[in-house]
Amino acid sequence: MNTDWNTFLRQTGAAIVEGGVAERVCSFGQPVAELQALDNGNILADVSHLGLIAVQGADAATFLQGQLTNDIRTVSATQSQVSAYCSPKGRMLACMRIFMRDDTYYLSLPRDILDATLQRLRMFVLRAKVTLSDANDTLVYIGYAGEHAAETLNAALGAPPAHPNEAISINGLTLLRLPGQSPRFGIIGEIATVQPLWSTLCNSARPVGANVWDLLDIRAGIPTVYTATREAFVPQMANLDSIGGISFKKGCHTGQEIVARMHYLGTLKRRMFLAKIITEAAPQPGDALYTSGAINTQSIGTIVAAQCGSRGSYEALAVVDTKSVATGQVHLHDVAGAALTFIPLPYIPE
């Protein structure tokens, strides 16, 4: 997190967890009220727990086209996309949102996998005219969401993007429209530009911790890859084919043979689902799932991401054996663990 931005957030009441690979705003002093704000107002969040990789150079588009699952040619100053970076075995090493700003591509992904992703991508640059760098000291990323978020942004800046994945540039800021039941926006810019906007938006929104923002991703059915789940899923298991995160017409990319074979010839036995879990301890990415109806004790699924919901339970995305979901007997940690109650995703998996 940018040092000056860290100082500014603390001055506005942010409690920031430090240490590890990324600083994270845990709350602005009222975590319960912040969670409740999802249901009755606009929210404003620091999104510094998501890192940014900048990709520049004459060969940047060609390089990314050969590495990622989506068609980088559709990314522009007015369009962002979700994409995945896979191993040669077709397993996701990262899941990211890609956008453009000042002729530079930016990959937004969790800070805890940024260094590993950056290091691996650099291995394949070879003689290409491409530079990859960590942009987190240069740019600030905030999130704004709520029923009246679009109207407020319109009054503060001008008309924001109208549809998910659309993007615009206004007054030195990049605005991304993100999926969600209510209007939701990612806002990226230099601290000198973002700081006054934050102060303006605070007049009509409640600042919230990073967990509240992450909960919106979960409710939107947007997968995230963390260190604990790197190489755990092929992209289709995490529904990337349902949210426009894979192009099957773009040509070759790392892991393409496996991803394409699954699409054209394979039978997908596991899919990502949205669920609620009533449990005391927070489920973690990578936690195993089991079914009481299984013949053996092998895991039948994995937690992708989970956050505390507004009614006391945890809300989670989980990749689970589809037959086990149909039985309704899926449990956390072991067959006697907390049961998962599945609820509809905002989209229908393909």
Image (cartoon, rainbow, N blue to C red):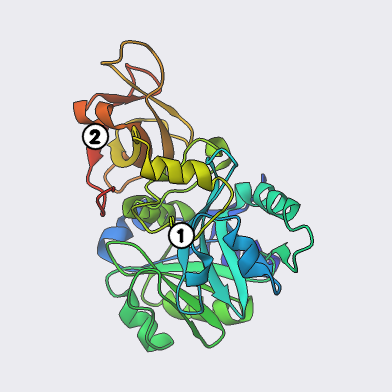
Q: What residue sits 40% from the left and 77% below the top? A: 203
Residue carrying label 2:
341
Most extreme residue toward the right is 127
Crowd band around label 1 with a 10 angstrom C-alpha radius: few (<14), some (14–19), many (20+)? many
The correct choice, above or below, for 114 with respect to 343 in the image is: below
Mark 2 Cα within 10 Å, few/some/many (few <14, many 20+)?
some
Position of 26 with respect to 156 (left or right) is right
Q: Is residue 160 left or right of residue 13?
A: left
Per the image, label 2 sits on a secondary structure element best described as: strand
Residue drawn where x is 38% and y is 59% of the image: 244
Q: Which residue is drawn at 55% across and 36% down?
A: 228
The disc label shown at residue 82, or none: 1
Pick the front one: 349 or 338: 349
* Image quarter (top left, top right, bottom left or bottom right) of the N terminus: bottom right
Q: In the figure, 79 relative to 38: above or below?
A: below
The reply, left or right, for residue 28 in relation to residue 65 is left
Tell me the element at label 1. strand
Q: Is residue 5 visible from the viewing direction of this image? A: no
Q: Earlier in the sequence, mark 2 or mark 1?
A: 1
Check disc 1 and give the amino acid type: Val
Q: The disc labelled 2 sits on which kind of residue? A: Thr
Compared to 174, does 243 lie above or below?
above
Residue 296 visible in image: yes
- Name the front one of labels 2 and 1: 1
Residue closest to the eye, 189 or 346: 346
Image coords of residue 134 (percent x, y): 69, 61
The residues tagged by marks 2 and 1 sit, at their Cα atoms, a distance apart of 27 Å
Spot occupied by residue 341 in the image (x, y as percentages of width and height): 24, 34
Residue ID at (29%, 75%): 148
Question: Residue 133 location, x and y as percent?
Answer: 72, 63
